[in-house]
Image (cartoon, rainbow, N blue to C red):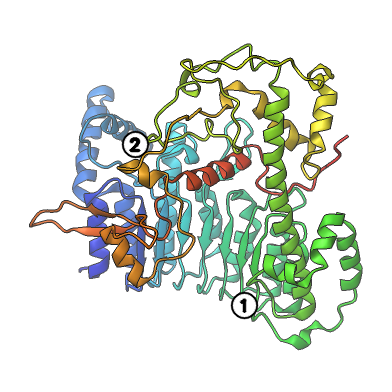
């Protein structure tokens, strides 16, 4: 029986033909449980002939070495070793279990059997990581996006526990739970009550989760309270940025519990809780006013000035809401607070890094010179920075090229003669929103010579690939008319090239040619795009990508 429709066959053939593919997308196809099982079985062990050949080799080796039949556990361990050896050889076959960074199976009629096959595939990846002694984030293609919208998944408590367990792992050294998944979509699935309760209670084991979609999953008031417990974790372990849970049965009390919990989640920026009950359910809300007063009392003066403007609140919380006027106002105030403080935290962190570079490295700037890749001066065509070499501010703290005359050394300022504690205390006033721990991370990063940026002194080139790499991204999306001109390289009114045509595939008479026009962002290797990307990576490195409501004393 052919379990694969045409699109699924094409998808599997693509995965089989190109081992470098790390994304799988299939939507609006009647794959059913049997097709899902077959797909995930292939992702786990590959083709049947590959599995048989691998097992025969392993059984022959073990029989020669041990003189006995191999057990299932030893067979699995030897299979991992065999695949590791294969990977080191040139032109080796694809490695299984096959890992993916993105998996989207929307409206494929997946039920519990297909979902269980998905969990077993995730467990095989987890087992492989444990056998190789590595972290899931350190593998080549960690799973970051899992979308299962419009399916028939109901699940059980045990299945929810196995699902979360397969997605999480213990961090080496600390033993704290960690994961790689950042976006999870379970919308439009008739999830059972036991699955929902168990799943929400274990979400803290997925600290990397940033987007959670639960629209039309049958959430009740009891489910909303468990979800609120996860969101309002007192230790701040919930790092959700977007939550979508509209068209459920949470009711006014359930939505109010979630809205109250969001006040303790400083990362949340967008929330949709529409169509969860009737407006008349808002009776008997006695404690709303008291909590509003306590909530507003924790705000700083700058934050209070922000939320006093209705226009500012709407601009920071576009698209968010819950359907009840009283709750929606508090929700939008909270989201506006989070967005405002996040931006201010990033701004102050970058400013603190800039002046810490200038002031704290005065003594050592003339004593030592960064060596290795930090001191080299590549050409403008080389735009492959590493996050450690590119700081988040435009600082020129690196030594001048050896061929250029060195400026005369100026005497150190009086600031450098102050005790270190006093210096750090003065600099701390540049970032009053940062905690002491965040400031210390920035100070340590600023005084480390290995984190200095690479000096690039050269004139921009006007031809070849450097023109694309120095190109500023287009803030406007392309129109059908502009796409054609960009693809052909025809210039705009200013005479500048806004796009390029590149060809992928084998080509030739028998191959297929695909053209791709880079118009919308005009090249991801441009200077501005790289600068913003490295700034975000640096903010995450020092823990300043989100506001921390800890101790903010600058004295």
Nearest the eye: 422 or 484:
484
Which residue does the image show at 56% across and 76% down from the upper left?
216
Name, please, the residue furthest toward the left.
509
Picture coordinates of residue 116, whole percent (x, y): 43, 60
- Which residue in the protein does label 2 denote? 71
Image: 508 above or below 388: below
Which residue does the image show at 63% across and 60% down from the upper left?
200
Of label 2 and label 1, which has the lower sequence position?
Answer: 2
* SS at badge 2: loop
Image: 345 above or below 63: below
Nearest the eye: 67 or 24:
24
> Which label is found at residue 248?
1
In-image side of 211 versus 339 (left or right): left
Picture coordinates of residue 250, whole percent (x, y): 68, 76
Picture coordinates of residue 454, whole percent (x, y): 50, 28
Image: 139 above or below 358: below
Q: Residues within 10 Å of mark 2 (few under 14, many from 20)?
A: few
Q: Quadrant of residue 451?
A: top right
Mark 2 or 1: the one toward you: 1
> Which label is found at residue 238?
none
Q: Are marks 2 and 1 in contact (CB under 8 Å)?
A: no
Quadrant showing the N terminus: bottom left
Quadrant showing the C terminus: top right
Residue at mark 2 to residue at mark 1: CA–CA distance: 48 Å
Residue 68: tell me if it is visible: yes
Which residue does the image show at 73% across and 60% down from the upper left?
229
Q: Quadrant of residue 294?
A: bottom right
In-image side of 477 versus 47 (left or right): right
Picture coordinates of residue 261, whole percent (x, y): 75, 62
Which residue does the image show at 60% across and 17% down from the upper left?
407
């Amino acid at each position: 029986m052919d379990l694969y429709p045409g699109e699924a066959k094409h998808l599997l053939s693509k995965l089989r033909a190109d081992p470098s593919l790390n994304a799988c997308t299939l939507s609006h196809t009647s794959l059913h449980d049997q097709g899902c099982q077959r797909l995930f079985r292939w992702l786990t062990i590959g083709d049947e002939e590959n599995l048989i050949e691998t097992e025969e080799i392993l059984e022959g080796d073990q029989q020669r070495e041990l003189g006995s039949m191999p057990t299932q556990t030893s067979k699995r361990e030897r299979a991992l070793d065999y695949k590791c050896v294969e990977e080191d050889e040139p032109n080796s076959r694809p490695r299984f279990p096959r890992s993916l960074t993105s998996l989207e199976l929307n409206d494929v009629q997946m039920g519990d059997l297909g979902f269980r096959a998905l969990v077993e595939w995730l467990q095989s990846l987890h087992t492989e990581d444990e056998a190789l002694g590595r972290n899931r984030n350190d593998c080549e293609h960690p799973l970051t996006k899992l979308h299962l919208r419009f399916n028939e998944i109901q699940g059980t408590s045990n299945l929810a526990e196995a699902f979360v367990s397969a997605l999480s792992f213990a961090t080496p050294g600390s033993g704290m739970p960690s994961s790689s998944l950042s976006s999870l979509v379970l919308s439009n699935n008739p999830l059972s009550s036991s699955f929902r309760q168990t799943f929400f209670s274990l979400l803290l084991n997925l600290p990397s989760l940033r987007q959670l979609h639960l629209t039309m999953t049958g959430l009740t008031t009891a489910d909303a309270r468990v979800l609120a417990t996860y969101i309002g974790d007192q230790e701040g372990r919930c790092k959700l940025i977007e939550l979508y849970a509209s068209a459920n049965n949470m009711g006014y009390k359930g939505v109010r519990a979630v809205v109250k919990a969001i006040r303790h989640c400083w990362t949340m920026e967008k929330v949709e809780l529409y169509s969860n009950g009737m407006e008349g359910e808002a009776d008997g809300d006695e404690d709303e006013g008291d909590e509003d007063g306590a909530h507003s009392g924790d705000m700083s003066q700058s934050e209070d000035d922000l939320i006093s403007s209705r226009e500012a609140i709407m601009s920071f919380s576009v698209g968010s809401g819950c359907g009840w006027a009283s709750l929606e106002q508090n929700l939008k105030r909270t989201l506006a607070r989070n967005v405002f403080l996040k931006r201010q935290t990033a701004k102050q962190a970058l400013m603190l890094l800039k002046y810490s570079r200038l002031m704290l490295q005065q003594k050592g700037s003339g004593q030592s010179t960064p060596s290795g890749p930090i001191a080299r001066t590549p050409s403008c065509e080389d735009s492959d920075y590493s996050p450690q070499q590119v700081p988040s501010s435009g600082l020129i703290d690196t030594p001048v090229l050896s061929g250029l005359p060195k400026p005369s050394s100026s005497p150190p300022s009086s600031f450098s003669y102050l005790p270190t504690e006093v210096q750090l205390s003065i600099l701390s006033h540049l970032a009053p929103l940062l905690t002491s721990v965040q400031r210390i991370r920035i100070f340590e990063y600023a005084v480390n010579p290995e984190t200095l940026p690479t000096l690039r002194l050269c004139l921009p080139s006007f031809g070849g690939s450097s023109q694309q790499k120095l190109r500023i991204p287009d803030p406007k999306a392309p129109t059908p008319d502009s796409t054609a001109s960009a693809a052909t390289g025809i210039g705009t009114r200013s005479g500048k090239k806004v796009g390029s045509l590149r060809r992928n595939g084998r080509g030739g008479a028998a191959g297929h040619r695909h053209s791709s026009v880079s118009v919308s962002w005009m090249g991801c290797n441009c200077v501005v795009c790289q600068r913003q990307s490295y700034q975000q990576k640096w903010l995450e490195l020092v823990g300043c990508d989100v506001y921390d409501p800890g101790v903010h004393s600058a004295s």
